[in-house]
Image (tube, coloured by chain):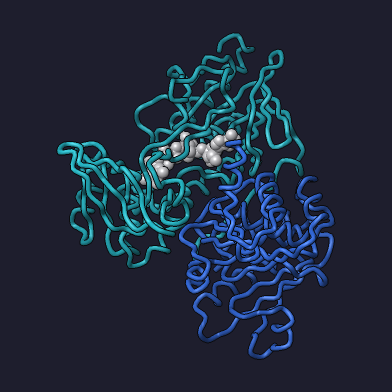
Chain colours: A cyan, B blue
Amino acid sequence: MSRLFVPDPPGEETGSTEADVVIVGGGPAGLTAAIYTSRETLGTILLEQRQCGGLPLTTDIVENYPGFPEGITGSDLVARMKDQASRFGTEIVEFGEVERTDRENDRIVVAGSGREYQAGAVVVASGSVPKKLDVPGEEEFVGKGVSYCAVCDGPFYKDRDVAVIGCGNSGLQEGMFLLDYVRSVTFVEFLPEMTGAKILQDRLRKREGTTFLLNHALTAIEGEDFVESITVRDRETGEERKVEVSGVFIYAGFQPNTAFLQGVAELSSDGYVRTDEEMRTSAPGIFAAGDVRVKKIRQITTACSDGTIAALSASEYLRDGRSKG
Amino acid sequence: MALLSERDAQVVREQLSQLQKKIEIRAYLQKINCDSCPDAEAILKELSGLSDMLEVRLLNPQIEGEEAEADSVDRVPTIVVSDGENSRARFIGTPSGYEFSSLLATIIETGTEKTSLNEKSADFLGGLEDDLDIKVFVTPNCPYCPGSAVLAHRMAIASPRVTSEVIEANEFMDLSGKYEVRGVPRTVVNDRIFVEGALPEDQMIEALDKALAEGSEEQVNLMELLQADQGE
Ligand SMILES: Cc1cc2nc3c(=O)[nH]c(=O)nc-3n(C[C@H](O)[C@H](O)[C@H](O)COP(=O)(O)OP(=O)(O)OC[C@H]3O[C@@H](n4cnc5c(N)ncnc54)[C@H](O)[C@@H]3O)c2cc1C
């Protein structure tokens, strides 16, 4: 049986809208920041648009988070982080999307879903969502063969052939999960080499029913009512071919959730938040942590690390009477 | 073994303490030919211990045939959440994983006087001239599903014109096949209006309103309807 998930009630019941620190996003980065700020006895409110957990909720097993030698399911791991944040007094508000941030004198206002919160410092840990590839057929077949969540939809593809687009860590890992259900997985990678961990590559190569199309671009997803095939182009020869599949799981990069920061803090051209090493953004009092930042390695451990630094920087900022930033 | 940690049990207790009326959960289960019934039973038993306002009745549709018929039960497990009069929201299959949170939200919505829907939705439901039968297909490990599931149930609880079923798609592959489910959440209204993925409340209501106003018998994809609007 899947672990029973118990949500935290929205903030209305508890009512507070004032905090020392407001954290946006309840993934690993936000939850870690919350553990630190609330343990420092700073009043902390964490706002999460859905239920806490972030991307690890969409993965089956996490094998590289230290302390769990046998691995741990993504949802179990983040449930523990959430318990830990609550234990130190973080007020967690789920199902409250942040739509806007503003500055009012020396307070920062964070608003959305009909509520408004004020804080001395804000930690943005809103992560990213899987990127659409914008190939013909992708949008048309969402829910009809195109999926961005293997743990959600994998069971519908029992004994069928599927494709996984993207051979980074998440693609390889979710491909491994899918192999428990499906007959075959065709992995399609744009680059000449897979970027996912070597151990995952080795394991997958040993499994029956796996095919790897490296240096191939997905050019179309086709079918009548449901996905029936994909077309891929060999980037070396230019040759195109069809692969018959009934499912396409897309793990080809991410896009950051930063709409509410537009014009408030400096973003990169693709929308990630720029910070310095102390997780300070260009806006005084606003810090950023985790996948939402401009950075190279996006993992749970590095999200937690960012969360720690952002929390302690925010704490220092509040202590120094907002003189830095 | 307890299914909920002490902390989770405490959170559930607190949430259930909001109940203003007694809630009856009628769980139709059977011992044979139902792999998931023991899990459903364990979950409901655990829940029933957390509030005096909650009565869980375990019923066997073969034995309690009359009640099963009154509740139009045609498969197990079926879990009907009722305040005695209002029994329009139900779960088909085991509410484990994220769907446990949907069950909890449904119980609270049924057992409190105030709707959690916004005014626009309430207006829409108040003006309904047709009956709506909503089915939401979910899986227990889908973090996006409770949003759609709870929205449908809230609509059913708020309006006598609406009934809703949250269906564990994995457990009932026959239904998933019939309703062409290849991804969750998938919401199907009156067997012809559908949407893939979790639409926020405002968009869902807006699109449904449009789809019903068109009054055709054709299949309608709510997402396409919304996108067409944006294109205008
Ligand atoms: C399929 C898959 C498998 C993975 N496997 C591993 C693995 O095995 N090991 C590993 O180390 N990493 C893994 N990763 C990467 C890892 O999940 C991320 O690096 C990590 O989750 C980043 O954490 P985060 O807190 O920065 O962001 P996220 O986890 O993305 O969390 C951000 C949170 O912010 C919320 N949010 C967004 N916008 C708003 C808003 N406007 N208002 C309120 N809330 C908002 C989101 O709902 C989300 O809960 C995997 C990723 C994927 C997709």
Farthest bottom residue in view: B63
Mark yes or no: residue A121 visible. Answer: yes
Farthest left residue in view: A237
Q: Position of residue B47 (x, y in %)?
A: 66, 66
Viewport quadrant of the C terminus of chain B: top right
Relative to A208, B34 lies left or right: right
Q: Position of residue A104 (x, y in %)?
A: 71, 16
Please report the residue visible at 43 percent of the width from the left and 18 percent of the height from the top. Answer: A277
Count of numbered badges drawn on the protein: 0
Viewport quadrant of the N terminus of chain B: bottom right
Q: Dividing the picture into quarters, in which one does residue A26 lie?
A: top right
Mark yes or no: residue A65 visible. Answer: no
Q: Check the image and report above or below for B38 versus B117.
A: below
Q: Dividing the picture into quarters, in which one does residue B163 lie?
A: bottom right
Residue B19 or residue A112, whichever sits in front: A112
Please report the residue visible at 20 percent of the width from the left and 41 percent of the height from the top. Answer: A234
Residue B18 or residue B231, whichever sits in front: B231
Q: Check the image and report above or below for B199 versus B107.
A: above
Please report the residue visible at 78 percent of the width from the left and 68 percent of the height from the top. Answer: B23
Please report the residue visible at 66 percent of the width from the left and 56 percent of the height from the top. Answer: B150
Q: Position of residue A59 (x, y in %)?
A: 42, 50
Relative to A172, B178 lies left or right: right
Q: Position of residue B173 (x, y in %)?
A: 47, 71
